[in-house]
Amino acid sequence: MVDWWLNSLITGLQSGGSWDLEKSGCADFLMGKFCCFSSACVQRSESQSSKSSGSGKNREGQIKYGFTLVKGKASHPMEDYHVAKFTQIDRHELGLFAIYDGHMGDRIPSYLQKHLFDNILKEDEFWVDPGRSMSKAYEKTDRSILSDSSNLGRGGSTAVTAILINGQKLWVANVGDSRAVLSRGGKATQMTIDHEPGIERGSIEDKGGFVSNMPGDVPRVNGQLAVSRAFGDKSLKSHLRSDPDIQNTIVDISCDVLILASDGLWKVMDNQEAVDIARRTRDPKKAAGQLIAEALKRESKDDISCIVVRFR
């Protein structure tokens, strides 16, 4: 097994590619811990901080949100970024919520935090067709990232973005395995799709790539990345996708909680468990903290980011 990892590392470097020890599983393997994939304002956990949290609410105060981010066990700086805020555009109120889970550095998630929502809202047809605007902005943003790889590096990031329009219509887009889950009548409804190499093997192989299945590990694109869609990842981009899956729903009286979180939470907790925990308290900041505390109790080692939105 060690020979396989070392040969893959050497091959990747010789070909001019890049390699992330944690995301590839090498770092934890070599340490003897084989892992998987490895307010009203925007805030960011500083590299040296182990935890960040905050809260906010919409203009009328009815819809509230809270977030908590915790750095994982890896030696590299925090690679999760988020957005959580309400903003007014003309006569519309938008709730903007996102989790960006980076790998091979934090430049790509940092870029997404600054630009992705702006790019979505700049689309001419946003108010007519939010879903199409989200899809176009995702792919345009990825092209911008790839064209500036000399500055942004060869890392990448997953993304889950949620836009709440006038407290009534919810649009969610994602690439990778960061997830959004809606509680409707207390029952968990996943609003995203986990983009896993094992599920999207056909697309990867059609593009000339392959999916590894090493014993004890998760499927990986070209033996490296454990998601089949992501922003960035220039050395693998010819075998990856960056187009998002998009879902939308009406936020009616049955909807009480929305959870956005990185895979550091979902590795150790299923959707219904997360909803049950989040609904125990009406304070969304406390709910986000409780979700992360439970994930840590279950020995999640990855960076964990969580946003909880309380509709009522």
Image (cartoon, rainbow, N blue to C red):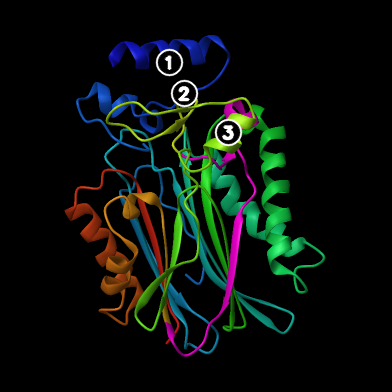
Give yes or no for contact between labels 2 and 1 (Cβ–Cβ under 8 Å): yes
Q: Indicate the secondary structure of the residue bearing disc 2.
A: loop
Q: Indicate the secondary structure of the residue bearing disc 3.
A: helix
Relative height, residue 209 to residue 240 (above, below): above
Give the residue at x 57% y 12%.
15
User: What kind of residue is marked 1?
Assistant: Leu
User: Mark 3 sits on what residue?
Assistant: 204
User: Mark 2 sits on what residue?
Assistant: 19
Classify residue 34 by image quadrant. top left
The mark that comes first in sequence, 2 or 3, is: 2
The answer to if 230 sits in the magenta stretch is yes
Q: Nearer the viewer, residue 64 or 45?
A: 64
Classify residue 187 by image quadrant. bottom left
The mark that comes first in sequence, 1 or 3, is: 1
Label disc, if present, on residue 294 of the rendered structure: none
Relative height, residue 304 to residue 92 (above, below): above
User: Mark 1 sits on what residue?
Assistant: 9
Badge 2: how crowded within 10 Å, few (<14), some, or many (20+)?
A: many
Disc number lying in front (2 or 3): 3
Q: Quadrant of the N terminus?
A: top left
Badge 1: how crowded within 10 Å, few (<14), some, or many (20+)?
A: many
Q: Quadrant of the C terminus?
A: bottom left
Inter-mark Cα distance, 2 to 3: 19 Å
The mark that comes first in sequence, 2 or 1, is: 1
Residue 134 placement (x, y as % from top left): 68, 60
Give the residue at x 34% y 54%.
266
The residue stretch that appears in magenta? 227-255
